[in-house]
Image (cartoon, rainbow, N blue to C red):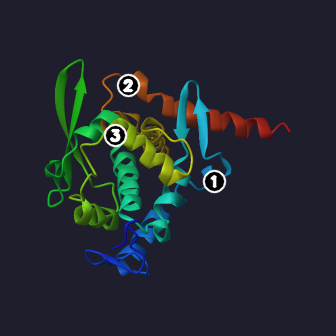
Amino acid sequence: MNGQNNVQNVKFDGIDFSQNDVLLNTNVQELTELQKKIQYLKEYPMLFKVETSKILNPYYTFEYLKKWDKITTYSALRQRLTASIIFFLGLRESEFTLLKPSDFSFANKSVNIITLKRKRKTVKTLPLEHIPNSELAIWEKYIYLKRLFNVKRETIYHRLCAFFGKKVNPHALRHSFGFFLYETTKDIRLVQEMLRHKNIANTSIYTRIINEELRNKLKKLLE
């Protein structure tokens, strides 16, 4: 491998990122199926604001996660894994920094999330049942990749900006998951549980997004 860490035509531990590998094909198909559930969001901007919160449109989150042809370096692989893990687990920036490979149990399809607030540490075990099997297989293969976890917050931010080609902070990606989860389930309590909100008022932002969409549709009836 050369000094630029280029891995074109090189296999990462069994997955060839330069060819149409079966696992990667399956991954793209499974992500596309999730993306279809929110097809109408394709018309929305990639980044939009609701009140004071900036949200990464989940339609485009899936679109970028499907672009395996862009993964040609170990640095790009870390960027994709960071984006995928933060999105599918709805992680806060600090929660990602505290993650360790040992927190994942792929056999039980669960993960322990450590939240540190006001010097108080809480551990929440979340299921991984909502994540496509192909995505979990990729996580399991590369969860021990050097310098994936235990990094500075600035590193996380720079990874996401490089991956999406825009200024995307981790919380916009966390909102992306919350928005997707509410849009596909309409279960506000489930979203609260998955995002680890103590106060459901914090979760209600996603209902306001949907209500805004309904208002816009109703306005068009009078146009």
Residue 200 is tagged as: 2
Q: Amino acid at mark 2?
A: Ile
Name the residue carrying label 3: 91
Q: Residue at x 29, y 41 (%)?
A: 96
Image coords of residue 22 (percent x, y): 37, 80
Measuring from the top left, give residue 203's x and y in whole percent: 42, 29
Q: N-terminal of the two: label 3 or label 1?
A: 1
Extreme residue toward the top, this view: 118
Mark 3 nearby-residue class (10 Å; few <14, some 14–19, many ≥20): many
Which of the 4 image quarters holds residue 196? top left
Identify the amino acid type marked 1: Lys
| x, y percent for residue 44 | 65, 46
Spatial separation of the CA atoms under disc 2 and disc 1: 28 Å
Residue 42: give its label.
Answer: 1
Residue extending furthest toward the front? 3
Is residue 20 shown left or right of residue 60? Answer: left
Sequence order check, earlier mark of 3 and 2: 3
Work out whether mark 2 precedes mark 1 in sequence or the reverse, and give the earlier one: 1
The answer to whether residue 92 shows anywhere in this view is no
Q: Residue drawn 38% across and 58% down?
A: 75
Whether residue 60 is situated above or below residue 66 in the rendered picture: above
Picture residue at 42% right of the left edge, 39% below the top = 170
Mark 2 vs mark 1: in front: 1
Task: Give SS at disc 1.
Answer: helix
Q: From the image, which quarter does the N terminus lie in?
A: bottom left
